[in-house]
Amino acid sequence: MATPITVGERIVLHLAQYSKHLNDFDAPFEVSQDGIGEALRISRAHAAIELKKLKEAGAVNERIAHIRAGPVKRKVYFLTEAGETKARNLKDFASRQGIELSPLLDLKKCKGEDLWAQLNPDSRALMAKAAVFRKPFKRAALPQSTVSLLPEDKDGMAEMPEALRASIPALLAPNALREAHSFAADYWLEEGDYVERLHHLLQANRGLEAQMLLSTRGSQMAGSAGPELLSSLKEMGDALPRYAREVRRIKGQAALRNADILFGSQVAQEMMLTGDPEEAIDGLELRGRVLLLEGKAQPALDDLLEVRKTKPSPLLDCDIAQCHGLLGKRDEALQTIESIGRRGSIGDPDVLEEVYSRKGQVLVSIGRYQDAIANFSKALGLARPGDKREIFRSMASCYERLGMEDKAREYSRKALRI
């Protein structure tokens, strides 16, 4: 940002916005050291150093005050008469020089076009990279700049305001935008966030690497697939033959996890029409599970029973039992889940957790709430990583149906805390 306005002068201009609160009992957060640092994208320590200089120069007064909605008192800062004069002189200087002050004061209040017009080429390159990140990232990953441009927390993490994340990419040339996404894709590789890496690979037109990522990390990603992953998978074009089957499998898993019936049905149809007998069975299984999501228990049961003839599995039996339960066939549902292998015969602990969880859902569907809680508890007892909110919500519902209101509230709170 080509401007002669120093950090100390930015603090003066920032505080000038809050002079009307000088005599308020509760001071705004923005006049505390933390508030000044957050607004101007500098560290709290940097703010303290600059404020000390301004106090010594007679431009700023310091006092202790309550912060609005805060539990404790803090040091707050307001301009002296000399400080107010300095602020007016700075504004006049900026006006004569054609300097836009708003980008210097609070990034959250900047419009993308206005900020962009004030940036030099190096700062534009930095902001372009920052603007494509959807999640907080390490500020140190980007080059340093002579003027603080990015909000940075005490852990060194930066995050662009949402309005700028929406507007700045639209100002970039196509090549610059792809370069920014490519940078972010490589950053998330180092951080091990493969969902974010996939998003940026696709935006950078690095489709082959996106397919390779799904072939090696797809199962790990699909295990906790949220709407972000599903959105990226929907954007993918046709995959190369060597990766196509795995890509379709991951798409199907993500569709099921996000209850996207339309997309799941489309993927199942693609799988069944590939001409590969094994993938056709996988497609039939996916279609059956999508039908189960729709509540179409009988056609789902028909598909899943057909799959079991050639590809039996404990999870498939859980879905078959769920179909029986929805159809009111309590005995068949119980017989099916009781036939599922015991703990010792299921070697994969992730599969075992899913089996217990699904058995619990089956038991809920037929009104066996105590038995359902026992299975949900076994699932939690395996202490596997991952999102447990659905299990907690199911347990809360069971306890509520049993009239155990304290336990119901306990598990509802657990679901909310995650």
Image: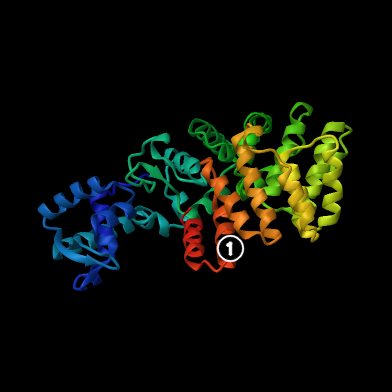
Task: State the image quarter where residue 310 is shown.
Answer: top right
Evaluate whether residue 267 shows in this view. Answer: no
Residue 198, percent across and down?
Answer: 61, 37
Residue at the spot 36% in from the left edge and 44% down from the top edge: 2
Q: Residues within 10 Å of mark 1 (few under 14, many from 20)?
A: many
Q: Amino acid at mark 1?
A: Ser
In this rendering, would 155 be left or right of 392? Answer: left
Quadrant holding the N terminus: top left
In this rendering, would 78 be left or right of 225? Answer: left
Evaluate whether residue 182 shows in this view. Answer: yes
Residue 269, percent across and down?
Answer: 84, 44
Residue at the spot 79% in from the left edge and 52% down from the top edge: 332
> Which residue is under mark 1?
397
Residue 149, percent across and down?
Answer: 38, 46
In this rendering, would 248 be left or right of 32? Answer: right
**In this view, 52 is above or below 402:** above
Residue 257, percent across and down?
Answer: 66, 48
**In this view, 292 is above or below 209:** below
| Label 1 residue SS | helix
| Scheme of colours in the image | rainbow
**In this view, 108 is above or below 156:** below
Q: Nearer the viewer, residue 361 or 341?
A: 341
- The number of numbered discs placed on residues in the rendered structure image is 1
Residue at the spot 74% in from the left edge and 52% down from the top edge: 334
